[in-house]
Amino acid sequence: MQYLLFPDPVIEEHGEFFKVCIKCDKKLPLSAFAKRGGENYLRTECKDCNRKLSRERNELKAQYGTPPSHYVCPICERQENEVAGQGGKTCTPWVVDHDHETGKFRGWLCHRCNRAIGGFQDETFLLEKAIEYLKSTK
């Protein structure tokens, strides 16, 4: 499997534009991708994969409820009042974190830490390489 942190977002073929979904790896027309949270760029996963992910997250939320009061993000150790609003005005402070291959619930994270892990595609070797890089440039 090839690991791309920043895949080329748009492919042009014969005057038509396509994008590859990072979840199903299908090349699809741009109309198959939703805009991200009202922003001016397209999501990295297609609408079908996004719906599947939403169902998985909703099922996990129903099963595991919400984090306890006074919860802190296990990565950045910030509290609810420090992470509120990171995911947008209508989002809760915490997001459900799960293994995308197994569907297993891992816990609750703040939006920033969840996006960081997602940016590295949940791959520990990529995170380790990032740590090595940061250490080497200090």
Image (cartoon, grey):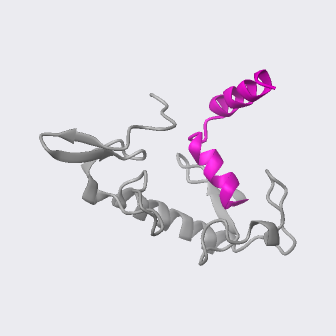
- Residue 90 position, x and y percent, is 59, 78
Label the magenta part by its dominant secondary structure: helix
Image point 16% across, 47% down: which residue? Answer: 16
- Residue 122 colored in magenta in the image: yes
Q: In screen coordinates, is 37 left or right of 48? A: right
79 or 14: nearer the viewer = 14
Above or below: residue 94 compared with residue 138: below
129 or 138: nearer the viewer = 138
Quadrant the C terminus occupies:
top right
17 or 52: nearer the viewer = 17
Q: Residue furthest top?
A: 136
- Residue 33 colored in magenta in the image: no
Residue range in magenta is 109-138
Quadrant the N terminus occupies:
top left
- Residue 6 position, x and y percent, is 48, 38
The quadrant holding residue 110 is: bottom right
Above or below: residue 104 compared with residue 57: above
The quadrant holding residue 63 is: bottom right
- Residue 137 position, x and y percent, is 76, 24
Image point 38% across, 38% down: which residue? Answer: 8
The quadrant holding residue 36 is: bottom left
Q: In screen coordinates, is 132 left or right of 61? A: right
17 or 64: nearer the viewer = 17
Q: In screen coordinates, is 34 left or right of 92? A: left
